[in-house]
Amino acid sequence: MTIFDHDDTFAPANPTAAPGRQEYRPALDRAHDLALEWLRSVPTRRVAPAATADELEARFRGPLPEGPTDATDVVDELAAMCEPGLMNMPSGRFFGWVIGGTLPAALAADWLVSAWDQNAAMRFATPATAAVEGIAGRWMLELLGLPSTAAVGFTTGGTMANFVGLAAGRTAVLEAAGWDLHENGLSGSPRITVLVGEESHVSVELALRYLGLGRPRTVASDDQGRMDPTALGTALATIDGPVIVGLQAGNLHSGAFDPMRECVRLAHARGAWVHVDGAFGLWAAASPLYREALDGLDGADSWATDAHKTLNVPYDCGVAIVAHPAVLRSVFGAHTNYIIQSGAAPADPFEKVPEMSRRAREVPVWAALRALGRSGAVALVEGLAANARALADGLATLPGAEVVNDVVFTQVCLSFGSDERTRRVTQRVMTDGTVWMSGSRWHERDVLRISVSNWSTDADDVAASIAAVARAITAVDDDS
């Protein structure tokens, strides 16, 4: 007997059944209404949360209820208690860390992903999502100009995408040195030296830690965080044994890109694996305006990015791309009697990432790319960069403000004179709540850091953000 009745109310076959067989429609209708209410509030509500985590924990505190609660009541209670603590991250005035918004098609697709409830790990068990994964991956490779034969896997985020690429590199360089990692493990293996730029992102260091490879060696970088190829060549010449070189497409503070072609050439001449951390900056390769800055990108061995950033799909959605599918499959592939596998090729989704159970993250990626098309994706990337430039130009006119990086993509860093004044302005901006820009420290000075990552940011958001910083400067100076 179907659980759906004829008037489409999603009624259970047995109304007195366990909570798992309750009606879906009332709770889903209420969640839909609340979701739209939230989205309608995004353009005008303050960005900063109105309550702290400690305050909200007090609201949620209490014993586990003894009996069931109606699903619709649960949805109402959850929304009401969480509302004061929600950061308005979908806002066009949110510029903290590197966090994108969500395109309408991607959000709608993600709702379907939750409703379908597919474990998107196996082609045999979930053919629909596996097919979508293959197409979404192919479209990404086309858009970014990466090898069409590369394998594409979907992870929780950029950190695990880095993990995947570096794990493949670890296996490949040890195999080239005559060591079978899968048979023998790391103990007793040749030491792998990992070289990264001085401003490599901490997620790369975390991935290396997870992989048991220890801290990387740093290579000198210029004042925008770009790796110095001459310094890389010198470092490579001093190393015995296997090597992995980690490059960066999009510096966290400046947005700058490592010189790909020369660094890849030097690394490959030494027999090194080249991995590119491109959490937000890899998407610049889609645009003719920025592709030249990434010349040689396609020559690397692996790449990592996060589709929630520049592509604007919902959390969570990292993407790992590896130019050598057989190596990737050897790292994450598993064979056991209870798994029905699809055959030799293409690989099952779980053979490309660490998880054997996961949601269908590739579906919102497909939806975003399908909705945008190539021209829309290019416009999205270029629009983010244009808004960063507009913010930098406007903020540079404010009293005592200095843009301290070359604005080459979507990142802007500002100083307001002394570190103390910069910290005070940053705190005032966050307290005001109109806009969210996070503080950081770069080149031995405190900065207000802006990352333009949201598709919905427009000229009005830019103007309102500049005005908010101007208010903060005035307030700080009046207090002095």
Image (cartoon, rainbow, N blue to C red):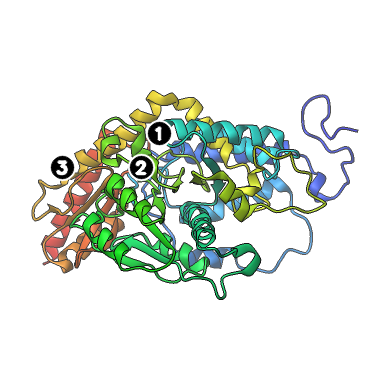
Residue 195 drawn at (x, y percent): 35, 63
* Residue 156: assigned label: none
Q: Name the residue at 56% across, 65% down.
A: 179
Q: Is residue 137 left or right of residue 264?
A: right
Distance Cα–Cα, label 3 vs label 1: 34 Å
Q: Quadrant of the N terminus?
A: top right
Distance Cα–Cα, label 2 vs label 3: 32 Å
Residue located beneath label 3 in the image: 394
Q: Which of the marked residues, 3 or 1, is nearer the chain's N terminus?
A: 1
Which residue is at the front of the view, 175 or 394?
175
Q: Name the residue at 20% across, 45% down.
A: 407
The local secondary structure at tag 3 comes to: helix
Q: Say if residue 97 shows up in the picture.
A: no
Quadrant housing residue 424: bottom left
- Mark 2 near mark 3, Cβ–Cβ under 8 Å? no
Q: Quadrant of the C terminus?
A: bottom left
Q: Is residue 219 left or right of residue 63?
A: left
Q: Is residue 286 left or right of residue 214?
A: left
Residue located beneath label 1 in the image: 145
The local secondary structure at tag 2 comes to: helix
Which residue is at the front of the view, 115 or 25?
115
Residue located beneath label 2 in the image: 297
Label 1 is placed on what type of residue? Answer: Gly
Q: Name the residue at 24% across, 59% down.
A: 426
